[in-house]
């Protein structure tokens, strides 16, 4: 089984093309649950009309499925609770110039 750290590190490889910050540091990932060789991710988008949404979902799925112990990844989008900038890490805020 992949470790939680490996799963999160894989998701950090997915970069929001508009903000150029990874989806983990943006606070878009709500949960990551692994059962055997399957991973289920619940994530959100910065806005309901985010044009990069399908791309982010596909890239997250691909990043997880590249891990040796993962055969299948599913990514579910939820808009509840809605994303807010407070979910971002300090590193993401620094990258975007938000203090």
Image: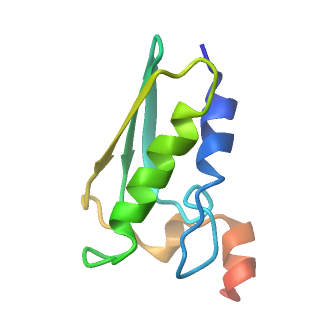
Q: Residue at x 40, y 72 (%)?
A: 52
Residue 45 can be seen in this image = no
Tell me residue 74's x, y (percent): 35, 36
Q: Residue at x 74, y 68 (%)?
A: 91
* Quadrant, the C terminus: bottom right
Q: Residue at x 46, y 35 (%)?
A: 32
Q: Residue at x 71, y 68 (%)?
A: 90
Question: Looking at the picture, does residue 8 appear above or below residue 2?
Answer: below
Left or right of 11, for residue 78: left
Image quadrant in which you'd find residue 88:
bottom right
In this orientation, which residue lies closer to the viewer: 31 or 64? Answer: 64
The tally of labels here is 0
Question: Looking at the picture, does residue 77 appear above or below residue 68?
Answer: below
Left or right of 7, for residue 75: left
Tell me residue 51's x, y (percent): 34, 78
Image quadrant in which you'd find residue 57:
bottom left
* Quadrant, the N terminus: top right
Tell me residue 83's x, y (percent): 38, 68
The colour scheme used here is: rainbow
In this orientation, which residue lies closer to the viewer: 78 or 58? Answer: 58
Image quadrant in which you'd find residue 25:
bottom right
Left or right of 93, for residue 49: left
Question: Looking at the picture, does residue 1 appear above or below residue 57?
Answer: above
In this orientation, which residue lies closer to the viewer: 13 or 34? Answer: 13
Tell me residue 66's x, y (percent): 59, 33
Residue 44 can be seen in this image = yes
Question: Looking at the picture, does residue 36 appear above or below residue 39?
Answer: above
In this orientation, which residue lies closer to the viewer: 83 or 20? Answer: 20
């Amino acid at each position: 089984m992949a470790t939680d750290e490996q799963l999160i590190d894989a998701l950090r490889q997915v970069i929001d093309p508009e903000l150029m910050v990874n989806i983990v540091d943006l606070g878009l990932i709500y949960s990551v649950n692994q059962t055997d060789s399957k991973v289920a991710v619940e994530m959100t988008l910065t806005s309901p009309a985010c044009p990069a949404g399908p791309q982010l979902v596909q890239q997250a799925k691909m990043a997880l499925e590249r891990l040796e112990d993962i055969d299948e990844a599913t990514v579910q989008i939820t808009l509840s609770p809605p994303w807010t900038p407070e979910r971002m890490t300090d590193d993401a805020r620094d990258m975007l110039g938000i203090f």
